[in-house]
Image (cartoon, grey):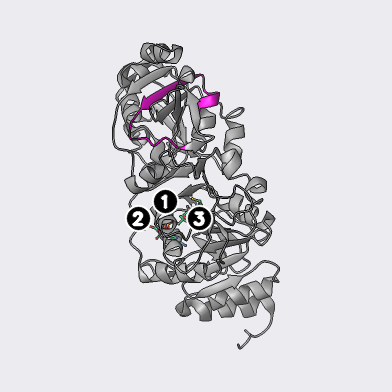
Amino acid sequence: MSDWKKLYKERVTSADEAVKHIKSGDRVFLAHATGESLLLTEAMVRNAASYEDVEIVHMVAMGKGEYCKPEHAKNFRHNALFVGTPTRQAVAEGRGDFTPVFIHHIPGLLETTLKPDVVLLQLSPPNEEGYCSFGISVDYTKPAAENAKITIAQINKNMPFTLGDSLIHVSKLDHIVEHDSPLIELKPPTLGETEIAIGKNCASLVRNGDCLQLGIGGIPDAVLAGLTDKNDLGIHTEMFSDGVVDLARKGIVNNARKNFNTGKFISAFLMGTRKLYDFVDKNPEVEMHPFTYCNNPIIAGKNDNLVSINSCVQVDLMGQVVSDCIGELQISGVGGQVDFVRAASFSKGGRSILAMPSCVKGKGVSKIVPFIDHGAAVTTSRFDVDYIVTEFGIAHLRGQTLRERAFRLIEIAHPDFRDGLKKEFERRFHRSYPSK
Ligand code: COA
């Protein structure tokens, strides 16, 4: 038996035994998003009574987030690098914290301010040389594993063996739990008329041969649906979902004209269904990398014609963009938004698009506003902003005066709110609103 197989056997344990290595006061990182080991998180929560003040750190939460429940307030404290549905209430009620951070800074923080004591992983079974793959979550999960004092890994045959900078040797795993369970899946969203119209407007800014970064949700999926008449598209992104697989199968996305990493899909994590996870399994065209590579604006910006498409919550008339909070309420995080807005600005021929419905669904509130809500924080500044898109059109803001920006934004606001915004235009710029 080769050495690694012997090591592997010696380190196999149960989930309940493995989590006993977490100590009070430890900082525990969970693998990111769909990569989270629900088995290990649940075992840790079962063992809650043994811990005090364990700091649970992660970005997007896709599990149950039970460590955030009020009854566990003494055992766990959540530090969110991106607030998600299961963790939002804890942060809002002061039982959890939010750390604002650009994604490409996270791996550096793992070596310093946020050094983990323990990391809970979910990996593919090892290959012949004893390397497991981080599969669908390489992002910060690999750097967390490399910097943690203790690594605990669920080995799951359902985790695809992805390639790129995505492997860890069995000798680096302290405790191994063998368990095959379905991975967390994210079903494609249902697209409404508004999303489809926004998708078409965004797609009109995409040219054949462009390299794309797409965020998560209805709008990026609607953009993908609007790209069926394009060709030779490429992908350099932080994440992608099932929609990209459909375009790849049609030959629309083939990475052929990428000037950097030609022929390769570059991503840090994946969120989709089994269809996506099977597509990336041992696929030499897909390279998974940590955030230091995917999200570093200087590296991503080496792709010519990089087009980034992300969503936002509110835009004021100067082009200041709020994407991660509603007033004081923290609803998400910066994610890769600013990383890719800047990457696109470094890219020769690059464009960055921030897209949103003109109104808050069902609430009759305009998302284009004179002033951002009290307590809200700017995510993408007026200095970084490029294109804003709604279902009513496209406002290109970069290089434009404040007056021209306000005009272009009002033209893509919901018609019900344009008169009010025009009054604000006239007050602010001391002139009549221009007739077209
Ligand atoms: N005022 C009040 N409420 C608002 C609002 C506004 N201006 N804009 C949105 N909301 C509410 C919505 O009504 C919805 O509430 P609900 O959950 O009760 O239905 C909620 O906020 C989320 O809005 P929605 O439009 O459904 O969000 P989404 O799922 O399309 O996500 C973002 C949009 C902006 C929150 C999300 O894209 C994000 O977090 N972006 C920042 C990070 C990023 O860009 N990452 C990119 C790479 S992944």
Q: Name the disc covering residue 231, or none.
A: none
Q: Which residue is mark 3?
A: 254
Q: Residue at x 47, y 61 (%)?
A: 252
When asked about the image quadrant of residue 35, the answer is: top left
Q: Amino acid at mark 3?
A: Asn
Task: Tell me where the magenta segment starts and ends, as one range.
Answer: 145-162
**Of 189 and 113, the residue lying toward us:** 189
Q: Is the residue marked by circle 1 packed among few (<14), some (14-19), or many (20+) residues within 10 Å?
A: many
Eyeballing the image, is 335 above or below 181?
A: below
Q: Is the residue indicated by label 3 positioned so its CB lies within 8 Å of ligand 1?
A: no
* CB atoms of marks 1 and 3 within 8 Å: no
Indicate the quadrant containing the C terminus: top left, top right, bottom left or bottom right: bottom right
Give how far across and how far down residue 222 sits, in percent: 42, 64
Q: Amino acid at mark 2?
A: Pro
- Quarter of the render that holds ligand 1: bottom left
Give how far across and how far down residue 285 sits, in percent: 49, 45
Eyeballing the image, is 206 above or below 38?
A: below
Q: Which residue is mark 1?
A: 241
Name the residue at the bottom extreme. Answer: 435
Q: Amino acid at mark 1?
A: Ser
Q: Which residue is mark 2?
A: 188
Q: Residue at x 38, y 27 (%)?
A: 125
In front: mark 1 or mark 3?
3
In front: mark 2 or mark 3?
3
- Rounded to the nearest angstrom, the CA distance separating label 2 from label 3 is 21 Å
Indicate the quadrant containing the N terminus: top left, top right, bottom left or bottom right: top left
**SS class, disc 3:** loop
